[in-house]
Image (cartoon, rainbow, N blue to C red):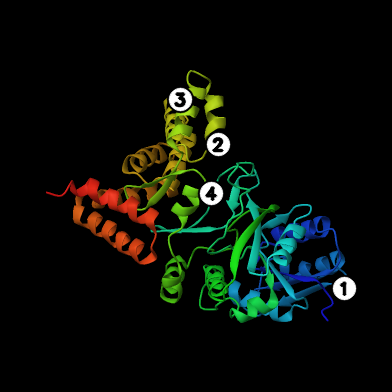
């Protein structure tokens, strides 16, 4: 019989202060002693080399293991190494740029025990200001995204139970048997999408995935060096290995949660605030202070009119960085040409180079789509075919309506 109920596996590379704070939060907020901590160090060159083992053993005297690799073998192989060393029947993979909160473990464990068909479960991951960083992965024709990222933690949609195609490996609890049966983290990826493929393999076994949102963990997100350096490689590998197993579901989540689903200018799916909610918020904020409008926008990130109005007011006041951020927020959920053009101008005025460069790139893409009408039509028709194969009536209707609007009524 295993000595521990669960094993916490943390891959690290440099960023000793993050690791130190993560371990301290585990000691302070886990509230039990039936677990072990396994930290896999991917050849760090900072204080992690000398501080990790004594610090860990001081916090978890007989339940701490530090594995030191001779080279950086990346996230997936490091997690697999930790899982093989782990003693418990349950594995909790955790990034070192996280801080757990009181009672974080119990909702995750309870969810797995209560639902035998649940293959893996994750917590609600939050930014430090309590906005959502992750409550599951959503998929659309634009690719993978964190569902309801930027929403306040107390928004009504956040706590709803839902089945997911994937959850992040930044914080994931599952049985060791499930992990091994799925093949662990595929080691061909380079710090990205290993978790998505793992979730695909778990779903292929007949199990499902979810987030237990009553468990909350703060996630500083992507603090590892070179985190996005291999984005193209990872995307191509995921498409090759799992492309047929992923299906559009952003629109399904949005429709169930009361949002308006639209086809945006990139011919992809977007979620907007429902018309009646938009009208109600306009009435509530009409003639009121910008502070009230700001609060309403922060509570309703998909409110297109609110974001645009607030961005314009900040621009008029000469607050260009703040205005640019509101237009950037718009482009995250609705990539429209006029919004990227505005972002481009504001980012230039604010000397925000990365935002400016991204806006230039997207303006070129959207302009090309507008000029090349055939390209847009081909994209719409390809999604219609996919919707027919998937028997997805909502997606089918959405794109058939878009095609009719683009081509006009039949003669």
Q: Residues within 10 Å of mark 1 (few under 14, many from 20)?
A: few
Q: Nearer the viewer, residue 139 or 372?
A: 139
Percent position of residue 143, x then y: 42, 60
Question: Which image quadrant is residue 26 in?
Answer: bottom right
Residue 317 is tagged as: 3
Please identify, in this view, whether the residue under mark 2 or under mark 3 is nearer the observer: 2
Please identify, in this view, whether the residue under mark 1 or under mark 3 is nearer the observer: 1
Q: Are marks 1 and 3 in contact (CB under 8 Å)?
A: no
Residue 148 is tagged as: 4
Q: Which residue is mark 1?
A: 62
Q: Residues within 10 Å of mark 4 (few under 14, many from 20)?
A: many
- Relative horizontal placement of residue 397, taking residue 274 as reference (left or right): left
Q: Are marks 2 and 3 in contact (CB under 8 Å)?
A: no
Percent position of residue 401, x then y: 29, 48
Percent position of residue 295, x then y: 57, 31
Q: CA distance from mark 1 to mark 3?
A: 59 Å
Q: CA distance from mark 3 to mark 4?
A: 30 Å
Q: Earlier in the sequence, mark 3 or mark 4?
A: 4
Q: CA distance from mark 2 to mark 3?
A: 20 Å
Q: Earlier in the sequence, mark 2 or mark 1?
A: 1
Q: Which residue is mark 2?
A: 298
Q: Are marks 2 and 1 in contact (CB under 8 Å)?
A: no
Q: Nearer the viewer, residue 368 or 390?
A: 390
Q: Earlier in the sequence, mark 1 or mark 3?
A: 1
Question: Which image quadrant is residue 84 in?
Answer: bottom right
């Amino acid at each position: 019989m295993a000595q521990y109920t669960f094993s916490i596996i943390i891959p690290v590379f440099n960023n000793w202060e993050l690791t130190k704070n993560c371990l301290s939060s585990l000691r302070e907020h886990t509230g039990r002693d039936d677990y072990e901590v396994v930290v896999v160090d991917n050849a760090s060159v900072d204080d992690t080399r000398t501080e990790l083992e004594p610090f860990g053993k001081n916090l978890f005297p007989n339940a701490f293991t530090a594995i030191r690799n001779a080279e950086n073998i990346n996230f997936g192989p490091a997690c697999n190494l930790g899982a093989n060393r782990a003693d418990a029947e349950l594995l909790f993979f955790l990034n070192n740029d996280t801080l757990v909160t009181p009672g974080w473990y119990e909702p995750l464990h309870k969810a797995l025990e209560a639902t035998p068909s649940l293959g893996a479960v994750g917590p609600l991951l939050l930014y430090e200001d309590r906005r959502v960083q992750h409550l599951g992965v959503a998929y659309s024709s634009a690719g993978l995204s964190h569902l309801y990222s930027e929403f306040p933690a107390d928004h009504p949609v956040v706590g709803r139970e839902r089945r997911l195609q994937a959850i992040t490996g930044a914080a994931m609890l599952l049985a060791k048997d499930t992990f091994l049966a799925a093949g662990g983290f595929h080691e061909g990826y380079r710090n990205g999408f290993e978790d998505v493929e793992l979730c695909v393999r778990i779903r292929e076994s007949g199990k499902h995935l979810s987030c237990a949102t009553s468990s909350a963990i703060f996630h500083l997100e992507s603090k590892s060096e070179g985190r996005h350096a291999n984005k193209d490689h990872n995307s191509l590998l995921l498409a090759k290995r799992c492309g047929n197993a992923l299906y559009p579901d952003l629109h399904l989540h949005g429709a169930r949660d009361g949002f308006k689903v639209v086809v945006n200018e990139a011919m992809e799916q977007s979620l907007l605030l429902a018309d009646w909610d938009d009208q109600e918020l306009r009435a509530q904020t009409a003639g009121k202070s910008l502070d009230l409008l700001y609060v309403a926008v922060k509570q309703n990130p998909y409110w297109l009119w609110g974001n645009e109005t607030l961005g314009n007011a900040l621009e008029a006041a000469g607050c260009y960085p703040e205005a640019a951020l509101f237009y950037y927020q718009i482009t995250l959920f609705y990539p429209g040409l006029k919004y990227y053009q505005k972002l481009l101008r504001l980012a230039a005025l604010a000397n925000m180079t990365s935002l400016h460069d991204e806006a230039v790139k997207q303006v070129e893409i959207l302009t090309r789509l507008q000029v090349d009408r055939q390209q847009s039509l081909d994209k719409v028709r390809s999604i219609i075919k996919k919707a027919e194969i998937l028997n997805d009536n909502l997606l089918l209707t959405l794109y058939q309506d878009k095609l009719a609007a683009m081509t006009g009524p039949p003669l």
